[in-house]
Each structure stands twice: as C-alpha cells, then as structure tokens.
Amino acid sequence: MAKRDRDGFPVDRRNFIKTTTIAGMAAALPATSLLSQTTEKAVKARRSGGTKRLLLVNDAPSEYGQLMESLKAIKGVDIIPATAANFRTPQEIVKSVQSQDPDIIVMSLPRIGMSYGSIANDLGNLTIPVIVFPQNPDLMMLDADMAAALRIKGVNALFANSQARAAELIKIVAAPGVLEGKRAIIYGRPFDSTSVQARNLNEEYIYQRTGVKIQYRPIEELKSQLESITEASAQKELERWKKEAVSVVEATDKGILDTCRLYILLRSIIDKEGLAGVSIDCLNFSFNSDRLIPLPCLAFTRLRDEGVAAPCEADVVGMLSSMLLQEVSKRPSYFCNVSEVNSQNSHVVLRHCVAPLKLLGRDAPALKYRIRDYHGLGGATPEVEFPVGLEVTMGGFTKDLKNFVSWPGRIQPQKMDTDRPSFAGATGASAKMRKYCSNRAEVEVKEVERFLQNIAEIHYTLVAGSYTNALSDEMLRLNTSVVGPLDAKAPEKT
C-alpha cells in the first residue's frame, strides 16, 4: 500500500469536517495522530481443530471422579493427564502450567500447607480462562483470594463454589465462539481508516483474540471490478428501493442506481469468498466531487438486512463489534456514532447515514423509510423510523479488544433535526449541505454518567433486544471483560 499523504485531501472536505459535527468526525481528522496502545501480554495462539486442552490443578485427583466424568462428556475438551505429585508446591504448579500448554485451567488448591501468593505472581501473564473452586466450599476464603489475586494481574479468573458450577463454566469457555472462523474484508489502508485509526492492532492479534480473519484490500480494486456491473443488472434493485420507500427526497435515480451496482458487486464478493463482513473507507472519498466509487450507504443497509456485518468507514473494531452483536442477536445492526449524551434526561443520541430496515429481525416487517441523499452531496441513504419503546442493546469492543461495552436502552420518540443545514446563511452548493446524518435514534439509558465515562470508541453498534447472558458467556470464551451498568435491565417504558 502507498504511504498515506496527509496533505492530499480536498480542501472542501477537510473544511466541511472541521466546521460541522457530522457523524462526530471533528475529533478524528486525517492529520490527528492517536496515542499508540500496546498489548502487555502475548496472546495465546489458537489451537487448530477447535479442541481445547484442559489442565486440572489439584492435589487429590481421586476426589474429583464426578467432575472428571462430567469433563469427559464435554465436546471439544482434551483433558491433560496429570497426577497429584505435580501439585505439591507452588513451584510445581507453575512449572506444570507452563509446560503443559493448556487452553483452560481448572484449579482446586490443597486445603492446607501452601501459600498461594507466589502462584498468582508467576501465572500473571496467562491469557486463558482460569476456573478456581474450593475443596472446602464452607471455607473458601483463600481460594476466593487466589482468584482475586489473578484478576488484578489481568487474568480471566472465574470462581466456582462447587464442582457442578465448575463444570458449567468449563462448558461455556470450551464452546466455540460465535466469531470463530469468520472472515471479513476491509477496503482501505490497513488499520488507518480516515475517521478511526487502529494502529495498535494487526491481523494476527485480531485472529488470536477473536477467531476472525481480517484482510485489507485497496479501494481501487473495487473501482476496477465495478466496471463489470452494468446499470441494467442493478435496475431491479433500484426499483425495489423506490417501491418500498415511503418517499424519495433529494436522491436521484442515478444516485440510487450507482449504489445498487455496488451492492451487486459486494454481494458477489461475499458469496464467492464466504465472508461474514465487509467495510469500505468511505470517508476517504465521500466529500469528493469525483468519487472513486459510489457511496455504499444503501448497499450496506441491504447487506445488513441479509445478515452481513457492513460497518461504515473501515472501522476494524466496529467490524468486530457488529459481527459479534449480529451473531448473538441474529438481527441486523445499526452502526452509529454516539453523537450526544444528555445527563439531565439520561438520553443518548445515535446518528449515522446507514440504518437497517430489518432492525426487528429478518422475518419481521421492515421499518418505514424514505430515501435521501448524503448530507446534500448526492448519493443515496435510507432514513428510517425507529420504533418507539423498543428495548435495545448497544456497545462494542474497546480499542484494544480486551473489553466489551454492553449497555441496555430503550428507544424514545424521535426529534427529527436531520434537515438542519451545515452552514447558517450559506449560498450555492453549501446551502444544501446538511449538518447531521440521515438517521437519528434517541435512546434512554440507566447510569448515564457511567455510560459517558465508558464510551468504547467513535462508533457503537445497536441491535434490538436484550442479550446480557449470551454476551457474558461469549466474553468468557474470548477472555474479554464486560463493561456495563450495574442494572442490566433496560429502562421501563414510559
């Protein structure tokens, strides 16, 4: 890939971003350098075949016959042979863990005669789940302290108060994750999106943490491939968009047809390569008069409705968040900016130019929509009517993929301000520019200040419904922490 020319962007686009709050981009100008982030621990390599090696750390194997039988019945778990002699001292425990290369550790420590402090220190670099449970459930203090000592080292330490609960947790962490083996293509500069850079990440780190294989390709590749997609082949898609819309305002048939051609191309690539996600660095050319390819807004809406993760702006973290929430919910997602947080009424405003029509599910009725252009600059976007009172889940991965923010909410009545101009008193072409994106969802949340202080990144992903337990289990498999409100229920309907 050619080195990015930070001074090569058209002046009109740069000034537009600087002088408006469009999509929350003002703080993410191309010339802005993000602080680099480092990963302190080497992520454990994923084992081929899906089987996970489990090491049971204990000093009395004969007392765990029932647990061992339960473990043998768990699909995909390979129990590492071990004897009590391996676990008589802290040094032996650490040596055994380091030499056996497990994917899951189940730890039930001796009742007496051992100090556990050094074990937590020496195992502090583990990036695998460690399940701790006491031999004496009625005297669990030291075991709970051991789990706590591991957690402050950044280890995903889970505490079970019985063998039965230990078996349940093992089933959760041993199951394949919903992202395992998924593939996605991002068109744009690797980890250098125009709006949200991710230079702390790379393909290997993403794969080891999530199981997703990300590949970057140049946008120019799409341009050359698009030449083979004729207008005639996209005519049916154009007619469908216009027929199902409540109205068409601003957008022209040509603008709609162009994005329909792009949809047909992307759909063919997805089908041919078996992709779960696709994204384009659209802000790289959105404000250019001679766009490299058509704006993908309608194409991304259709792809999301069809079950494909299609986040905007080549946001790789947003890609992973969209893929995960769509897989967990089995519903299309609204990929958006947290545009505003109102602490007085606990409302969050979410904006973006792409929204799914099938937010309620692929078999549910589509949301009503009208077709607009893109900020008064041509192209075509859907403006949907979000259902008032709908319970939703929103959030996403943090920038290092070590945490996942999950926040429940409820959609509130719309305050439609999407016609507001970008520049007061402007004339000519500037008078047509709109300040805000085509879609606006206002969501009531609990613990709004906590929400504000835990915004994960520039984009959030919203899906209809509540998935607290499913997301918690999935994060255990990914060795990722969940961040959310203390009360995981959405606000009540008013």
Image (tube, helix red, strand yellow):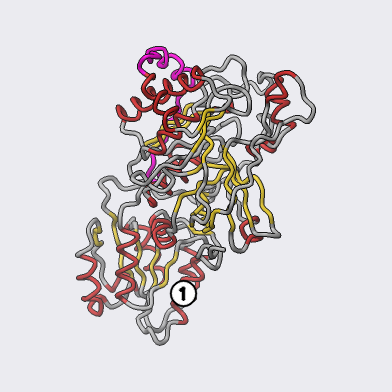
Above-or-below relation of 269 to 414: above
Please name the residue that numbered disc 1 is placed on. Answer: 116
- For this orientation, the residue located farthest to the bottom is 138
Which residue is drawn at the image coordinates 53% and 26% (left, top)?
380
Which residue is drawn at the image coordinates 43% and 60% (left, top)?
472
Number of labels in the image equals 1
| Magenta segment includes 230 | yes
Q: Which residues are magenta?
A: 208-233
Above-or-below relation of 38 to 280: below
Where, by quadrant of the figure, is residue 26 drawn? top right
User: Is residue 33 in view from this perspective?
Assistant: no
Crowding at label 1, few (<14), some or many (≥20) Cα neighbours within 10 Å?
Answer: some
Q: Locate residue 108, reporting x and y percent.
A: 35, 74
> Which quarter of the image is occupied by the C terminus?
bottom right
Above-or-below relation of 336 to 226: below
Q: Amino acid at mark 1?
A: Tyr
Q: Locate residue 398, reporting x and y percent.
A: 54, 49
Which residue is drawn at the image coordinates 39% and 44% (left, top)?
365
> Helix or strand or loop: what does disc 1 sit on?
loop
Q: Nearer the viewer, residue 39 or 1?
A: 1
Which residue is drawn at the image coordinates 62% and 63% (left, top)?
447
Q: Locate residue 351, reporting x and y percent.
A: 59, 42
Where, by quadrant of the figure, is residue 158 drawn? bottom left
Where, by quadrant of the figure, is residue 346 drawn? bottom right
Q: Locate residue 244, reporting x and y percent.
A: 42, 33
Q: Nearer the viewer, residue 309 or 45?
A: 309
User: Is residue 124 in view from this perspective?
Assistant: yes
| Magenta segment includes 36 | no
Q: Nearer the viewer, residue 294 or 43?
A: 294
Above-or-below relation of 336 to 191: below
